[in-house]
Amino acid sequence: MTTEIATAHANSRLFELVPLVRLCNVWRLKSDRIVFTNGVFDILHRGHVEYLEEAAALGDRLVVGLNSDTSVQRLGKGPDRPLNDQYSRALILAALRCVDAIVIFEQDTPLELVAAIRPDVLVKGGDWKPEQIVGSDVLKAYGGEVRSLKLVDGFSTTALVERIRHGG
């Protein structure tokens, strides 16, 4: 597969909000169960992949809200984060078979995305209790499901960055 074809395929999974909402409506008409998660996904590692595959298994379509570069900086992950720009992070996510759509968001939280997309399942990692997950109240109001998935022990981007910096 040439680089141009691979990039075109990945780009076909990147959406602005309005086209993504339309696509979700089409999926819903087909009775597809839509799962939504969000995150930074700065340096993709095994923990991310296992988490995304488990999230995708909860439905028919997995939508990932990707924090923009500026929103990552506001999260306080460090002055040099993200290490990879938003477009690079989105292309890497789009290459994963389990990810159906990616939308980059500028806000501090994905609440606007959750309200617009109206997924059937909202998922975050096990460091979040279901009632703490942003948008959980929105989902519960229309009967959606909120899930907190177990994290893969020993895998976090922050820990990985620290090991790289300190030669561990």
Image: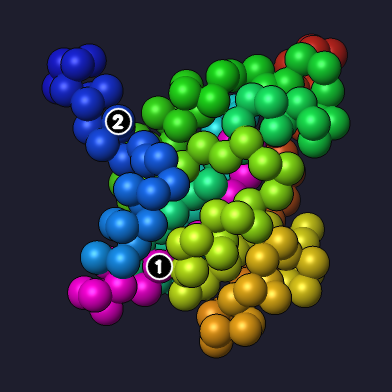
Residue 6, placed above or below residue 13? above
Residue 23, placed above or below residue 166? below
For label 2, the residue is: 11
Is 8 in the magenta?
Answer: no
Q: Quadrant of residue 136?
A: bottom right
The span picked out in magenta is: 27-41
Could you tell me if residue 57 is visible in this image? no
From the viewer's perspective, tell me whether residue 162 is left or right of residue 56.
right
How dense is the environment of label 1, judged by Cα within 10 Å: few (below 14), some, or many (20 and up)?
many
Residue closer to the observer: 144 or 97: 144
Regarding mark 1 in the picture, which secondary structure is present there?
Answer: strand
Regarding mark 2 in the picture, which secondary structure is present there?
Answer: helix
Residue appearing at x 50%, y 28% in the figure: 89
Could you say where residue 7 lies in the image, as x and y percent from the top left?
27, 23
Could you say where residue 57 lies in the image, as x and y percent from the top left?
41, 67
Q: Quadrant of residue 10?
A: top left
Q: Are marks 1 and 2 in contact (CB under 8 Å)?
A: no
